[in-house]
Amino acid sequence: MMMTDTLSERSALVTGSTSGIGLGIAKALAASGANVVLNGFGDVDAALAEVSAVARGGRVLYAGADLRKPEEIETMMQTVRQELGELDVLVNNAGIQHVAPVEEFPVEKWDDVMAINLTSAFHTTRLALPGMRAKNWGRIVNVASVHGLVASANKSAYVAAKHGLVGLTKVTALETAKTRVTCNAICPGWVLTPLVEAQVEARALRDGADRDTAKDALVSEKQPSGEFVTPEQLAKLVLFLCSDAGDQVRGVAWNLDGGWVAQ
Ligand code: NAD
């Protein structure tokens, strides 16, 4: 319980938090007392309601920004500063997937994956760091993937972006090493979110299988546990990294993946 109390009066931004893993992380931060800013597309009101329902004293706000657009990221970061002051916790979580062989990969999809999964984290980090340095406290958590550590066929943009995000994490950790700002990456295996539902559906179509069979086949192929990771488990890892116990965890790419990368 002590760990969950440490975030009251902290302010956090979670990108891509209207859905899936980001929503789970936003809820955990709010339940730990932090002010939380949500970002992302889709049903914003539902996400705000879900996070507000578990908030323990902190504010829950929304800052819309299309993370493909640096100028919208700048506006989002200014809005956050105006509302809550300097950020304490930055979770770069937004991400998209596109599956196709390299030679057929749509160029505009490559650009979108790079912009959302990698470049947006550069922009939020460069804009949040001066405030964290001024306070001499901060936590930057980049939601990478096992695909930041190993590859799978047909995911060139995603694997390149996530490896890049792990690289950005390490550099940021080194540049902040003498401060109380830390930067780390977490690397989930399969998590059953809308991003993965699309891949389950594609597999069901390909194999002529029902959804459940396709889902089991998808998870078992790469993940020895045969079970999905949950947003709640990932959120607890984020809370640990945000705690005092996380002070000397710097520049890691921490996989939570049912054994995927152990193979
Ligand atoms: P999701 O599709 O449920 O959520 C993605 C979020 O990003 C949504 O809130 C969406 O609105 C937002 N988003 C997408 N494009 C955006 C844009 N241009 N601007 C602003 N927001 C945008 O996906 P998820 O599975 O929860 O994925 C979250 C992160 O976790 C991603 O970075 C993903 O790569 C990573 N990840 C997911 C899995 C998995 O198995 N689901 C595994 C490893 C890593």
Image (cartoon, grey):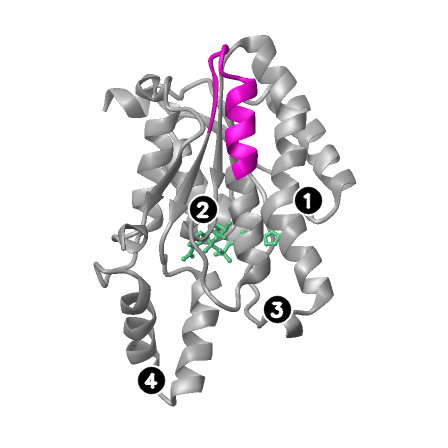
| Distance from mark 2 CB to nearest ligand 1 atom below 8 Å | yes
Left or right, 247 with respect to 224, comes to right
Magenta-highlighted residues: 167-183
Question: In this rendering, is residue 165 above or below 45?
Answer: above
Question: SS class of the residue under badge 4?
Answer: loop
Q: Earlier in the sequence, mark 3 or mark 2?
A: 2
Q: Are marks 1 and 3 in contact (CB under 8 Å)?
A: no
Q: Quadrant of residue 223?
A: bottom left
Q: CA distance from mark 1 to mark 2?
A: 16 Å
Near mark 1 (Cα within 10 A), the count class, few <14, some 14-19 or many ≥20, is: many
Type of amino acid under label 4: Asp
Q: Amino acid at mark 3?
A: Val
The quarter of the picture where the C terminus appears is bottom left
Residue 21: say if magenta. Answer: no
Instruction: List the residue tagged with mark 4.
Output: 210
In the rendering, at what x and y percent does residue 19 appear?
48, 53
Mark 2 — residue? 23
| Residue named by callout 3 | 102
